[in-house]
Image (spheres, rainbow, N blue to C red):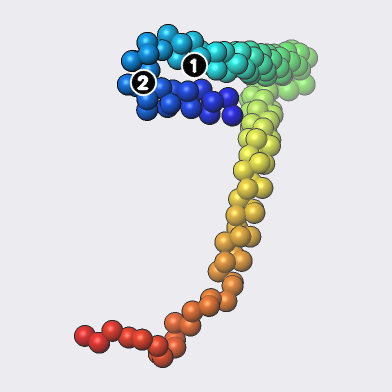
Amino acid sequence: MMYEEASQVATDAVGNIRTVASFCFEEKVMKLYENKCDGLKKTGMRQGLISGFSFGISFFLLFCVYDTSFYAGAKLLEDGKITFPEVFRVFLVLTMTSIGISQSSSMSPDFNKAKSSTVSILAILDGKSKLDSSDASGITLDA
């Protein structure tokens, strides 16, 4: 809605450029446009900070898990309870499992949209058409 208001000011100014120029309203129109965009800037900055902070925290946690996995693997390797290839095998299994879980959970909104779209498409395909393509009656064009 905020984009729409700022866009409307710009559209009106361009559409009425002769009126704006003849009354020397260029500065007034620019200030009005900037005022409409101030809220957008604040919202964009807030969303950018939140998403950047969340991204940083997620990578911090990811590398903490890597660190913990390698530390535990090194301790088990030092005690002779596990071999070097087994450490990396377990690490890769844990990594691939976590990637799979994160990707599947991020696609759940898309899955719900695809499910409702499929139901809608199948309802259209299964519906009975008002036109009968096998009926030869009606007006035809003679060649």
Left or right: 21 as drawn, with respect to 93: left
Q: Is residue 40 left or right of residue 25?
A: right
Write down the quadrant of residue 122 in the picture. bottom right
**What residue is shown with label 1?**
33
Amino acid bearing label 1: Tyr
Q: Is residue 13 left or right of residue 74?
A: left
Q: Mark 2 points at which residue?
A: 19
| Residue located at (73% from left, 15% from top) | 68
User: Which element carries disc 1, helix, strand or loop?
Assistant: helix
Q: Which of 86 and 125 is in front in this view?
A: 125
- Residue 64 can be seen, yes or no: yes
Give how far across and how far down residue 38 sits, in percent: 57, 13
The residue positioned 47% from the left and 23% from the top of the image is 9
Asked if 102 appears above or below 74 in the picture, the reply is below
Quarter of the N terminus within the rendering: top right
Quarter of the figure that contains the C terminus: bottom left
Q: In this view, does 40 lie above or below 126?
A: above
Q: Choose mark 1 or mark 2, whichever is in front.
A: 2
Q: Position of residue 115 (x, y in %)?
A: 64, 53
The Cα–Cα distance between marks 1 and 2, rounded to whole angstroms, is 17 Å
Label 2: element kind:
helix
Residue 24 - label = none
